[in-house]
Image (cartoon, rainbow, N blue to C red):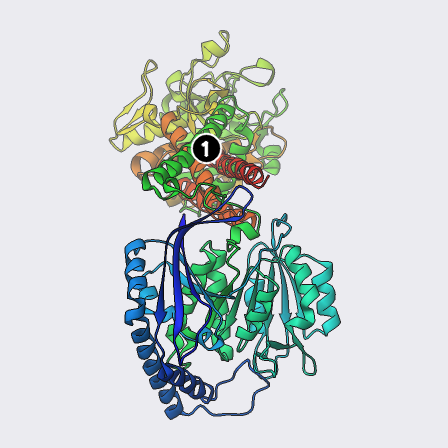
Amino acid sequence: MSKLVVLKIREGNFEQGFPITLQIGEESTDEIGRLSYLPIAELSGRLPANLDLQILCQQWQSTYRQIGLSLRLSAPKQQITNVSVTQDCQEAAQAFLKLFNQWMRSEGVRAIREKWLEQLQPQDKIRIILQVENAELQHFPWHLWELVERYPQAELALSAPTFERIDRLPSTGLKARILAILGNSEGINVNADRALLEQLPDTEICFLVEPDRQTLNDKLWNYSWDILFFAGHSSSETKQAAGEIQLNLTDSLTIPQLKYALRNAVEQGLQFAIFNSCDGLGLARDLAELHIPQVVVMREPVPDAVAQHFLRYFLTDFAQGNSFYLAVRSAREKLQGIEEQFPCATWLPVIYQNPTECPPTWHQLTGQLTSADLPTSNPSHLQNNPDTRIKQLLRRAVRMGAVSLCVAAAVVGIRSIGLLQSVELFAFDHLLRLRPSEPMDGRLLIVTIDDAERQRYGADLPDLGRISLSDHFLNELLQKLTAAQPRLIGLDLYRDFSVDTSENDLVNQFRQNNQIIGVCKARFAGGDSIAPPPDLSVDRVGFSDFVHDADGILRRHLLLMTPELVDPNSPCTTPYAFSVQIASRYLQSTNVAVNLSPISLPQFGAVSIQQLQPTSGSYWNADTLGTQILLNYRMGELAPKVSLTQVLTGLVNPEAIKDRIVLIGVTASETDDFWQTPIESQMPGVIAQAHMISQILSAVLDNRPLFWVWLDWIEWLWIATWAVGGGYIAVLVQSPVRLVGAISLMGSILVLIGWGAMIQSGWIPLVPAAIALVMSSGIVTVWHLRLNRTAKA
């Protein structure tokens, strides 16, 4: 609800004075958008005769036009601004303004002034319409009347003394349709105006560059427009005192010459016109006779730079949701910043209003009504009641919150039954690959066995895909390694067969060398198992089983399991993974307490596996075999590698082996011990084991975090937060283009947060939050569009 103040000065002159009438009322729009006005006060007064005021106005106009700026009045002549003339203009303006305000405080208007102050509050939104017949009074700086200036949300518009409402077709598009005429631009830059218009959101703009009269006439007849815009040279100094615009270098045009086309444009929905050109009051008066709802013109000749600044300020404020009147006021006041160079710039812009019309908002022009734009048929106290407005805002917030929370609940429900698992894992893999590289783990050394070495040093085994070393070369390898004093030797080779009787040294290595850790397999393809080396004690054996996800990608680190539950007849009976056996022995050698009791979860120093195991999300329930944690792969090169041949031929420096964990495994292509991982499409099993060992050691010794996730309720709150955020953005940003941009920005922020968490080894619900954000904003937007259509209907 806003206040409407109408000042009527319909007759009189400066020799005899002017009668003046004040009306104050409340305005609203009815259910079909028609303006409704309820007067609450009216009284009359009289402005006294004052010839000096008329003279000062003419003196100011004269000095203003002598400054010599580049104007949009006519094709300019070369002039140089005279500093003394500029100063004369400023002094003339101050003298004129001082006498004007004294005139408006005269005894004959005291009652009007008192009623004004009584009925209007400083916080009121006020439209002031001055219906004035005298052409000279229209040039007065009414906006600088001290009574107007004390109201920060008030703006004044001129109006013709006679007016009529024209039935217009309602706007049905979702974009503001603008017919932009770029007329004769000799000496000025109308392309700056064009660039400003092109930046407007949700618009369809037709530019007519220096058109002829017939082209302009056809455009006005054959299409419907919301806004008519003109930039170029114009004036009101014709013989008939009518407004005239210069279409091009040779053709000029008055408003009456477009009478029928413009009347048709109004009937087809034209809302307002902007003439960003000189001396536009004559244009405005002619347009008022055609009952155009509202026009913005310049009172006097306008410098090119001032016209561009005003247009930028006005369009920015108006498109951001400010009311038409306050957008004009804001743009006008911002021109004060250039008044040192362009005196009286703030005096120039003025609205010419048809009092029967209510100015549109940008959202109304683009078909995106907000609740603030919806018609209000009750002009009474209900709309002005702060409690009522607060209740309305609360209802909107509750509805938006309810929709958003329903979306969040739906996303959580869909996630709980596993429907988002594949996309969540895809996002997890992608973010994992984006992490920066880490230094190599110098505690490890990997001895690889490739295809050629398998042929040269390998043992023939009956099972396809199983590769090992012959007893002779394995014994030689272990002797060379042992001589270099490694901390541990991890033998990631299946040896479920006895050592040849001729290799007693190898038997002694297995039985007596506590540094050697071997592997067995609790379950194999088709349910088979692989026994540990017969000569290796069970406390130095770990299972090599991995647990991959449904998509075949290895993301889990299996630490403990009960083999009897997998296969009661399995020869692999160790409850500990190969990686756990090696890591725990290494930690014990550094005096770190390790608890590997089969009846409790592993404890490595201060690191408790129980605290690190994820507890939420359908992903983790996909396979409940044993104790698992997420495998925190080390990005970049994991550890140094040497070939089997290099070790056997003595090409490896013993210092590269000393005190390290040496892992021996195959990388030959003939084996099936390759795994698809988030960071490599085919990773040899021995490399995966190295990642697992490094994960445990780094967590305990280097404080490198294992993967963590939030508790269920925190994840639910996180998803709900993004759902509510999406709904809130949809309420604030009604423009589809801006909404897409805002959601894209929020999505980018969400991805950055997810990536930042991943760098810190955190897996947060990125995909569910993104889905909640988009769904919530989309549903709230559709909901608002339906409300708007209902309101329009």
Instruction: Give residue 764's position: percent from left, percent from top.
Output: 42, 35
Position of residue 636 relative to residue 629, above or below, is: below
Q: In terms of depth relative to the viewer, which is nearer, 750 or 34?
A: 34
Report which quarter residue 49 is drawn in. Answer: bottom left
Left or right? Give the position of 695 relative to 643.
left
Q: Tag 1's secondary structure?
A: helix
Position of residue 265 relative to residue 728, above or below, is: below
Instruction: Give residue 328's position: percent from left, percent from top.
Output: 45, 64
Q: In terms of depth relative to the viewer, which is nearer, 508 or 36?
A: 36
Q: Can residue 254 be seen? A: yes
Instruction: Give residue 248's position: percent from left, percent from top.
Output: 67, 79
Q: Can residue 640 be seen? A: no
Position of residue 740 relative to residue 708, above or below, is: below
Give the amino acid at mark 1. Ser
10 Å crowding of disc 1: few (<14), some (14-19), many (20+): many
Q: State the residue position of label 1.
A: 404
Residue at 41% across, 31% down: 489
Instruction: Give residue 488's position: percent from left, percent from top.
Output: 37, 31
Residue at 50% across, 80% down: 301
